[in-house]
Amino acid sequence: MSDENDLVAELINGEYRALARTITKIENRAPGYRDLVAGLHEHTGDAEVIGITGSPGAGKSTLVDKLALSYREEGLTVGVIAVDPSSPYTGGAVLGDRIRMASTTGDMDTFVRSMGARGQLGGLSTATGDAIKAFDAFGMDRIIVETVGAGQNEVDIVRTADTVAVLVQPESGDDIQMLKAGILEIGDVFVVNKADMAGADRTVKQLSEMLEGRHDDGGWEPQIVETVATSAEGIDELLETFAAHREYLESSGALEEKARTRYAEEVRTLLREDAGRLLEDELERRGGIESVVDRIAAREIDPYTVADEIVTPLERCLDAREETPPRS
Amino acid sequence: MSDENDLVAELINGEYRALARTITKIENRAPGYRDLVAGLHEHTGDAEVIGITGSPGAGKSTLVDKLALSYREEGLTVGVIAVDPSSPYTGGAVLGDRIRMASTTGDMDTFVRSMGARGQLGGLSTATGDAIKAFDAFGMDRIIVETVGAGQNEVDIVRTADTVAVLVQPESGDDIQMLKAGILEIGDVFVVNKADMAGADRTVKQLSEMLEGRHDDGGWEPQIVETVATSAEGIDELLETFAAHREYLESSGALEEKARTRYAEEVRTLLREDAGRLLEDELERRGGIESVVDRIAAREIDPYTVADEIVTPLERCLDAREETPPRS
């Protein structure tokens, strides 16, 4: 565990190499990554996290680039996490590509990291949440999480953000489809990008109609902002809208509430993942699932009895325990 | 547990009331339902299970009605389980409706049972699998599981069947959409119902094209059958196709393989559900998730440490255990 402590200390100390190594460990679920992320937690809580989602081609990367630049001009440090669950590339390959893009900002205080779907080692949204912690503990003022809409996976990822911006392209049938599929509910800000294209006004109008009634609860009223990311048009207004949303979150108590919901989900997800691994190990101990299935197929035992035989001892064990043993 | 033993004995003995009570217990996850289903298992394995899915309005109910009639004419007993996860009605209300429909078959050896999404008491596909066991143990020769396409829930449900038929309406944009969304992969037989409608030929042609290459593995080649369920046209051919698929499943060993896959999934699903309950109980014991979240928000602890504190003792408990205690 001392390796992890050292790495956390270096990261807190602002060493980029330590940040990069930390995120690689998180991505790969490398040995010790749990202690590493556990060690980061107490240093988190200061960053503002913004999620950006939208269909491929909507201009997310360009917009993120411009947002990062503007934040830098304000003297803020920015971390960008680009998540593409469908990407077949390893993190490394995607990373190279995105770092080139980010270099337009011209300094190291914008740190871009791409995460692909490396293997099936647990949820990408967990890894994204952990990476956000690394950026936060490192001291980034703003963290932008960029992801491709519109599956459940992406919705989960983008929900790790405090403020969610949904990018829409004018006259894009695909995008309207996406909005219907549950993205409408998660957007705090809707960005009609490429607003110089024909049909932008119509898209804004459609969006307004779809969003009507969304603020009936007296909470945040979803905003629509028009941008042309390529020429940075509308970026200032977008940043002001983000700031307004942040202010709403803080003054209403919604920020704290969101964080609490996230923590609860995090705990439950980890418990589910850990318990799943434990149960798989227990099945292995019984000769593996195939041997269990042999007995079920032979009608010697049934699935419920198998589950009882594995879970009941665990239940007894928990019941018997007087107090929580200290963490090793 | 003796109540459950009695109920199983009555069910095996062919008492319809016992079958109905069993399925109600399964639906409601009533106390003792686990022992009940566990007791059914050894009496299962003889029924042929057919899954029917398709969009609302495709004519599923009429087709199922006609299939049941034909089976009855062959002297076979038939159980029908109609699953509609989106149904807001209780099982009872839906049941009344469907029993009327089934009465056209004119005898009690067709037993229709509808299952709605009653509360959030675990997966509907688990309940459906358990209900199939009840019908199977009761001695039904054929079990038809009818479900509305096309969500993941429905795909899971229909996979509890040995043979899956997908109903398609001619010229239905919706249906083609559905087929793209993963249903194409699960269908063994595609039924173009309402084949007397204009556009039926085109739908058959589209389907053939979409299915091309599906049988490259030398396995079952998905069949397309045209029916007009209202006039029972094509029903004989459909039954022959079901029988041919059954023969393929038996001779190729795929039937056994499917059953094994299902058993493995059943065990894993039960373990997941049980462990989830166990972990929730453990969170409760720690003052509930809210109190855990309080400590996380105060940076006194972090989610990974919470998970470790709960799961590590379980791990130790399993490691310490020499052998499986007998089932109580």
Image: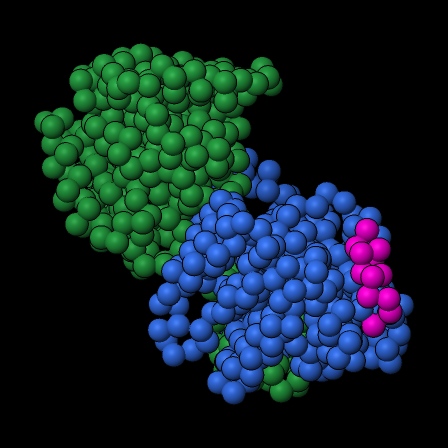
Chain colours: A green, B blue
Q: Judge left or right: residue A295 versus residue B104.
A: left
Q: Which image quadrant is residue B185 in? A: bottom left
Q: Judge left or right: residue B96 versus residue A297.
A: right
Q: Quadrant of the N terminus of chain B?
A: bottom right
Queried whether the magenta region covers residue B102, the answer comes back as: yes
Q: Which image quadrant is residue A65 in? A: top left
Q: Give the magenta range.
A: B97-109
Residue drawn at the location 52% of the way across and 87% of the way down:
B251
Residue drawn at the location 63% of the way across and 48% of the way down:
B56
Would you place residue A291 above or below residue A311 in this image? Answer: below
Queried whether the magenta region covers residue B7, the answer comes back as: no
Regarding residue A21, the answer to whether it shows in the image is yes
Q: Which image quadrant is residue B225 in? A: bottom right
Q: Position of residue B253 (x, y in %)?
A: 50, 85
Majority secondary structure of magenta residues:
helix
Q: Nearer the viewer, residue B55 or A313?
A: B55
Q: Quadrant of the C terminus of chain B?
A: bottom right
Q: Nearer the viewer, residue A248 or B237?
A: B237
Q: Position of residue B133 (x, y in %)?
A: 71, 72
Regarding residue B271, the answer to whether it shows in the image is no
Q: Position of residue A118 (x, y in %)?
A: 29, 55
Residue drawn at the location 48% of the way across and 33% of the way down:
A180
